[in-house]
Amino acid sequence: MNQKELENRLSQIKDKLISIEQLPHDRIYLLCESENSYPVNKFVFDDIGARFCIVTGVDSDDCFEILYHYSYDQTGCVITIKAFIRDRENPAIESIAPFLPGAEWIEREIHDILGIDFKNHPNLKRLILADDWPDGVYPLRKEVKK
Amino acid sequence: MNWKIWSLKKSPWVFHVNTGACNNCDIEIVNLLTPKFDVERFGIKLVGSPRHADALLVTGVVTRQAAPRLKEVYRQTPKPCVVFAMGACACDTGIFNAGYHVVGPVDKIIKEVDPNAIIAYVPGCPPKPEAMISGVVKALSAL
């Protein structure tokens, strides 16, 4: 499908999103709450058939953002699903690793450094931090000072 | 001159330790061994175990995970041995200075084990292979 059809296809899932933002013509942001991130990811990966690139975790001032980046290679369009986690005390989001095993390690990494709990993750243990790193200290959170 | 030092200078065997480098210095070290620079003509040879080595070639800033391992490698190296801190990160943590995983530069960690350790510094990001050869020659002639 071409770019126009892709945009129409993405608007089918509008009821699960906060909004759809389109910056340049080949970059689409789907903004959603953390509860809806699983069905939105499944739609983009399974139904649209976009290629999974990577996940990014961001500590914003009042919430955590998890950005799932997909590439739709037929048009070169990059689709980014931006999920907001409003609960700063116990941040949690549904894992996409059950249907997308390639996301397993990056979710473990985000769990290590931002302390986000990925629910239903098959193997959520320490990946990149040192063995003697204290539990419960997440080095890339804003409140942590070196 | 001490006969131990004399024999060490004749043909220093080196063990390469990566304590958290970005691989740029490591690529330049590999370049030293290729026919273009060919440091084996000076008797400098890369060995697979610190127990066979006369010198340690340390690249990269020392991370929290790597610090105890670097100390253990230093303890296992027969003395006298020279520690070469290769690159800006190994010399003085470089751009990783404020990183959460950084313990310190190489000299600080080595001096925790042996305060009288012989440490040579080759700065650069990465140092040129010529600079590395020059650093090794200067360090050995200073012994």
Image: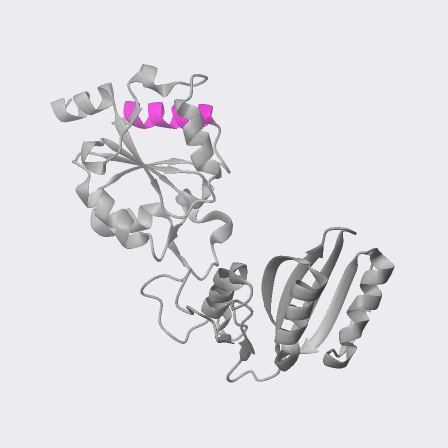
Residue at image point 65% right, 64% down: A46
Q: In the visual, does B114 lie left or right of A110?
A: left
- x then y, percent, for residue A109: 48, 63
At which x and y percent is residue B79? 16, 36
Q: Quadrant of residue B64?
A: bottom left
What is the quadrant of the N terminus of chain B in the image? top left
Whether residue B123 is visible here, answered yes or no, is: no
Tell which residue pokes out farthest to the left in this image. B3
Single out the residue that lies furthest toward the right: A4
Question: Toward the viewer: A95 or B42?
Answer: A95
Residue at far top of view: B41
Magenta region, main secondary structure: helix
Residue at figure coordinates x 70%, y 56% from the top left: A71
Q: Quadrant of the C terminus of chain B?
A: top left
Q: Position of residue A76 (x, y in %)?
A: 76, 51
- Which residue is nearer to you in this view: B94 or A104? A104
Residue A122 sits above or below residue A72 on the image: below
Return the residue nearer the eye: B96 or B114.
B96
Residue A117 is covered by the magenta coloring: no
| Magenta range | B129-141
Q: Is residue B119 left or right of residue A46?
A: left
A93 over A29 or under it: above or below: below
Q: Quadrant of residue B63?
A: bottom left
Residue B101 coordinates in the image, percent (x, y): 42, 59
Q: Is residue A137 left or right of residue B11?
A: right
